[in-house]
Image (cartoon, rainbow, N blue to C red):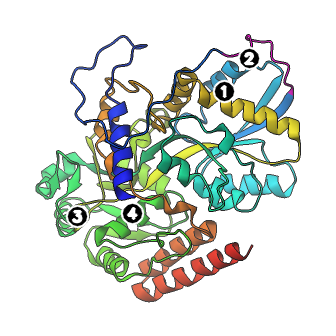
Amino acid sequence: MKNIRKALALVLALCMVLALAACGNKADTPASNPPAENSQPAAPESQPAEDEPGTNDLTANLTLATYPVGKMTDETVVKGLIADFNAVYPNVKIDLIYLDYTNGDQTVNSMIEGNSAPDLIFEGPERLVANWGAKGLLVDLKDLLPAGTYDVTAGSCTNAEGAMYELPVCQTAHCMGINKDLFTEAGAMQYINEDTHTWKSTEDFLKAVEAVAAIHPQVGVVFCGGQGGDQGNRALVTNMYGGTYTNPEHTRYTGNCAENVKALQALVDVNGIEFDPGIVGGDEINLFCNGTLAMATCWNVGAAQSETQGLTANFEIFPMAFPTESGDPVLQGGIWGFGIFDNGDANKIEAAKAFVKFMTEDEAQYAKIVEATGYWPVREVAGMYEGNEIMTEYGKLVPFMGDYYQITLGWPEARTAWWNALQRIGAGGDVQTELDAFVAEANAAAEAAEAG
């Protein structure tokens, strides 16, 4: 499986530097990564639509709820995508609901309880597969899966029974970001392999933190005010000494392993890192960008390109993998795509499927929505992001993408149990005791979900 993931990742990195005929501009440098031997074949060229624009008589009123994935909550962008669809399906009206990661889940759950769930939703497998899909609320979309979609990605959007509750659109590797100016001033860049964007070792990571702490009061935080951005603190903890968060089968939680205990104790002890129960990942990003923090664990290429959200910095941000002893970091992947709620209306489901198919089947339209997210496609699309320096630099981290364990049973309850455990550890609780409590609570939720 690990080799398959790395092959997939190399393909994703390669797609950024291939020639894009539609752009007309040639890349300044040749591709730096060779084609992966086990890569999926490219999707076949799309055929012209059978329907002439404006002639399809499918009629429905739909609601699309979207989380802030790249520009998918930018009204101009999203309405532009819908306008493309309405050129072919003029009688399908789509109303928009823009969600955030603070109360978006509560909003959707309230709509479900009120029998008014959105028809379409754009988010990741941890919500669409492990939560609402596991509750039987979503439609199986495997019949819409485009040819050439990477097997690993498709598998992450599919439950154990083979139902695909998310039609994947894009993906990325979450990472760290450091203030390179501060790290350089502190002499801490010596602990980093700049060409690969990796730490030389976990111990070197801790030395770097101590060095920066000598000139800057706040180096980093373990944020634990909620679940927002928790892919960052999970990856930091599990990478440091090779720990795990779940078993390989994604049925039970293993976060209380000795490696994770050692990592969290090191984070408690090191000078320059604090546990903060008052913030979540988005707050950490803001504190990092305004210079308060010298590094962020909730970072990715989307944050690096989010000037429209005010995420500007007056220093050089250098993307990093998480620290490991083995030298083989395992980054959390992010996968986003469409889900369709089964609201008991066959006509609405048909119209919603038509929308998903329209956005993902034709290569040109698919490239348009992927570019709107700011992430990478889930199948080969020739020449995307040619000449884009940020995508090229962050693409170096894509080969480190690891197993997508966020589809483990009981995931919503496990996320709450995790940040509660981190709060107790930050307040002085014994690390082993608190991680044992986390695992007990998370596995109880997993067992309940398994029992139905």
Q: Amino acid at mark 3?
A: Val
Tell me, yes or no, whether the two marked residues, 3 and 4, touch with CB atoms within 8 Å.
no
Residue ID at (76%, 35%): 352
* Tag of residue 84: none
Residue 172: quadrant of the picture: top left
Q: Amino acid at mark 1?
A: Phe
Residue 432: x percent and y percent? Answer: 41, 87
Disc nearer the start of the sequence (1/3): 3
Residue 267 belongs to the span the image colors magenta: no
Q: Which residue is mark 2?
A: 88
Q: Amino acid at mark 2?
A: Val
Q: CA distance from mark 4 to mark 2?
A: 43 Å
Q: CA distance from mark 1 to mark 4?
A: 35 Å
Q: Secondary structure at mark 3?
A: helix
Residue ID at (26%, 60%): 328
Q: State which region is magenta.
A: 49-59
Q: Which residue is mark 1?
A: 358
Q: Nearer the viewer, mark 1 or mark 4?
A: 1
Q: Nearer the viewer, mark 4 or mark 2?
A: 2
Q: CA distance from mark 1 to mark 2?
A: 9 Å
Disc nearer the start of the sequence (2/3): 2
Q: Secondary structure at mark 4?
A: helix
Q: Amino acid at mark 4?
A: Ala
Q: Which residue is mark 4?
A: 235
Q: Nearer the viewer, mark 2 or mark 3?
A: 2
Disc nearer the start of the sequence (3/4): 3
